[in-house]
Amino acid sequence: MTTITVLLVDDHLVVRSGLKALLGTQPDFDVVAEAASGEEALGLVEHHSPAVVVMDLAMGAGMDGIEAIRQLRQRNSRQAILVFTTYDSDADIVRAVDAGAMGYLLKDAAPDEIFAAIRGAVQGKSVMSAPVASRLFQQLRNPDEVLTPREAELLSLLTEGLSNRELGQRLFISEATVKTHLAHIYAKLGVETRSAAIATAIRREGMR
Amino acid sequence: MTTITVLLVDDHLVVRSGLKALLGTQPDFDVVAEAASGEEALGLVEHHSPAVVVMDLAMGAGMDGIEAIRQLRQRNSRQAILVFTTYDSDADIVRAVDAGAMGYLLKDAAPDEIFAAIRGAVQGKSVMSAPVASRLFQQLRNPDEVLTPREAELLSLLTEGLSNRELGQRLFISEATVKTHLAHIYAKLGVETRSAAIATAIRREGMR
DNA sequence: TGGTCTCTCCGCCTTTTGGCTGATGCTGCT
DNA sequence: AGCAGCATCAGCCAAAAGGCGGAGAGACCA
């Protein structure tokens, strides 16, 4: 039995100590360090070279989890990165996998599920919670409903409450183009109005 | 030194065990039970009569934290109830205090802050995290920005993505009245458009 | 080469929203 | 009695958003 060294990254102390206590019940896990922010995580990975990084996405201040994952990947570190977060937002899942995460777990996952995910991650297996997986499958099944990068960008700005004119200025495109994109977004989201699009977008993305 | 019995209520196992580990470092705390849902919490309070109930607001399924607090209060139980949650949403704070919570802590609070809050709660003191307190003060200082019940009702429906016409039909008022209410809501929220109102409303309410 | 996506842009027309002013009835407080 | 706040409604007008059809440029892939 090989020992698996783990770095925990979460801005909430209670979550870190809870996870640490949980992993402590397994003989093959060794939590070698904890970080409360993305910046801290980068430094600790350097010094400890853990086999697995378990990372929350929503970090209170500074670098968020996605960015931390991206930077870890760029430094060609060989850590397996597991996302461990509260919400199963479509955008977060895609972005995390895109950034190089090996797996995606929800915080309400059963202990055994968490253990299995970590053990799998070091072996190169990617593991995700059932709700997360089903979301991804649905996206694969309905490619029509997947926003293009540009559309996603627009939608994101839309949830800031910008007008068409402002959207155009911000993205350096004409208002006509903005309207075209919006029409496509509405169709894909299955809504008829900007308001409904904002509502579903914000709710869907898990927020904050 | 008296021992303070505590019931933890949170749907996330890691949070519960983290909090338990944290409270375990203090000699005067005794976590007598844990619940993963509001329903479970009600039963456990019956059997254990803890001095303090530490409760998360966002429970995955079933009864949410606010409702659990309300029901505990109705059963004239003498427990001090502490809200321990991730987001400092205006609405949640108000509703929790209204339902009978003694304090409102954020999950990123420092350990000492958590300890102090629990010890204070049994003595009838109400404690809240600094960001939470400042939100409440701001509401007291700027009563102009507090929505009337009717306005809040409208805003809530607004975040469903309804049009003015639909709002009117739903509330049995004319479209003219809807517009009047909306104008007031925009002014109080400090926004100019429906979109921005929806965005700030949903974000402010903490969501999920 | 041809087909498909994506992003970009146009015009025209209808509907929706928002700003402004003003007004009524009710309630509660002083 | 008088005043303030709330909820209700109206009309008018300008601005914003949305629906419809069409279209060109570049990327990518079979």
Image (cartoon, coloured by chain):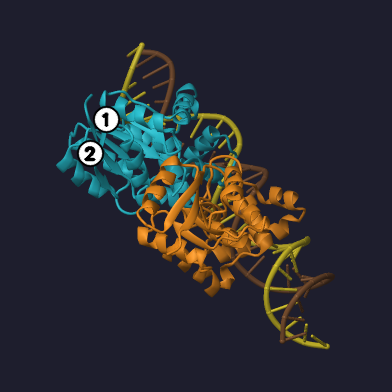
Chain colours: A cyan, B orange, C brown, D yellow
Residue A15, position in %: x, y?
37, 46
Quote the CA–CA distance across marks 1 and 2: 24 Å
Q: Secondary structure at mark 1?
A: loop
Q: The numbered mark 2 sits on a residue in which chain?
A: A
Residue ID for mark 2: A72
Q: Which residue is outermost to the left? A: A47
The first of marks 1 and 2 along the sequence is 1
Task: Respond whether the residues carrying marks 1 and 2 are from the same subunit.
Answer: yes
User: Which mark, by number, is residue A28?
Assistant: 1
Q: Local crowd at mark 2 within 10 Å, few (<14), some, or many (≥20)? A: many
- Foreground residue among C21 and B176: B176
Q: Secondary structure at mark 2?
A: helix
Q: Which residue is outermost to the front? A: B1
Location of residue A140 (image quadrant): top left
| Left or right side of B165 for A111 | left
Residue B161, position in %: x, y?
61, 46
Instruction: Say what amino acid the circle numbered 2 marks.
Output: Leu
Mark 1 and mark 2 residues within 8 Å of each other at the beta carbon: no
| Left or right side of A98 for B40 | right
Residue B49, position in %: x, y?
57, 53
Using the image, determine if residue C1 lies above or below residue B192.
Answer: above
Q: Is residue B86 visible?
A: no
